[in-house]
Image (spheres, grey):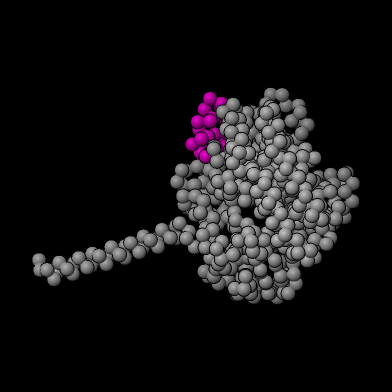
Amino acid sequence: MSTKLMSCLAGLALAGLIIFSQIALAESVIEKGLTSSKSADFSQGLFNPNKLVSIEIQMAPADWEFVRTDKRNYSWEEAASVTVNGTVLENVGIRKKGLVGSVNSEKPALKLKFDKYIEEQLAFGMERMILNNNVSDPSFIKQYLTYGLFRKAGMPAPLCNFAIVRVNGEDLGLYTNVEPIKKPFLLQHFTSSKGDLYEGTMSDFRQEWMNTFENKTKSSDKEKTRIKAITTTLALPDDRFMEEISKLVDLEAFCTYWALEVLLTHADGFTNKGNNYFVYFDPGPDKMYAIPWGVDKTFIPSSYKLPGIYTKTALPSRLYSLPQGRKMYFDALRTLLTDVWNEGAILAEINRLETQLTPVVAADLWYTTAKDWEGNPADFTTSLNLVRNFVKARRSETQRIIDNPPNWKNLLATNRKQNKGNKAGLKYNNKSSGSEGNKNTTQQQVEGWINYLRTTSESQAHQAIQSQKFRALDSKVQREILNRAKALKLNLSFEEIK
């Protein structure tokens, strides 16, 4: 073979190697999410905690009126333009979001989808934005603090900061800008984005509650095989349970998540209500991980008498009923108090947020008529001080629970009266309980709605019962909620449900 030919072949081989390397690098960049929100957008200010995001939306007034007052379908409409921190994006999808607590027509929570009408259109590398209205949190800061503490503990949790939103020149006020739980997020926190992601809304690993897990990724197993596997494993006898559940769930991560929900009093979350969370089945370890969501009801004062341990859903209940599971939980809680719960740092951040947000809250027109949880006019300083008091007291409160652990109780029964009468404990089985299961779901739904209606303003309660979510309830559930509200003399003016 001639030297020239050998040189030519070597050149071709080198070129092929370079091309292959470039392809591999491109695939690696895509898979590792180097253009994701966490790596790219944070540096550009979209989630910078020291900067407020500016969002200006221009759209036809009739379309905005539809979005603002949408109570049924939460349909996508088209905004002519959305300007994010000075960057103009045209033809952007916009729709209302929220369930019960965040449903509001005056200051609606919103979703923006930049590539809804223009393929591959992004804002700072992101396809979407989620803007929460904080109508359940007069301090505005609970989501920001909660997600930050989850991340500090090494848990997968969204980035979060604050945004000022205007529509057609009208100032809607201060919003929380929360990172969407989409592929870029999954790539940052897990081995791959190709696993199965589900959102839990009144969902649990019980036969009668499994169907409410909502598939959120195209690759999700439509038969919910992994959800069913965990449900089935929960029915195993004690001598097999811990070994088998550890094959399906990262128990160390779950116990940290569980302990954080208790420490931060996330009363409307996964382990206490089966609500406001995601579960992701990471293909690498092939195990389930929980992701917090909807955390505006946290930092709740002890006067509300929340339980010292959350065991109202199947997995934490079963773990707490066993010595090994209980030990894992309290080990996680002790670690959080040592490594994560730094009162000085949290209080300093609250002080910084007060300085940053006070002028914006003062200009928020919605806040001038907002109510706190007791029905009094909302006050920003008072609300912040309640969070400060919680932070100062929480370590001692938690230590008392660690020193005197509550006994395990069956809290999965259909209501509190049955809980008191159930002496036999929780029975795990793999059979659907039929009408009993329907009672479980009904009672949870009714109690959740009543708790909200008791603590919100009359106008917000009225909006909530006209929402798509309320109208989607079974008519018997609707009637029970309305009857309970009237019996409690909540003085609400409900429209007839047709």
Q: Residue at x 59, y 41 (%)?
A: 339
Q: Is residue 242 left or right of residue 5?
A: right
- Quadrant in which the N terminus appears: bottom left
Q: Is residue 423 above or below residue 310?
A: above
Q: Residue at x 18, y 69 (%)?
A: 8
Q: Is residue 298 left or right of residue 460?
A: left
The answer to which image quadrant residue 262 occupies is top right
Image coordinates of residue 417 in percent, x first then y, are 78, 31
Image coordinates of residue 208 in percent, x first then y, are 64, 40
- Quadrant in which the C terminus appears: bottom right
Q: Residue at x 46, y 50 (%)?
A: 191
Q: Residue at x 66, y 68 (%)?
A: 54
Magenta residues (range) = 228-250
Image coordinates of residue 317 in percent, x first then y, are 64, 33
Q: Is residue 490 visible?
A: yes
Q: Is residue 71 visible?
A: no
Q: Main secondary structure of the magenta part?
A: helix
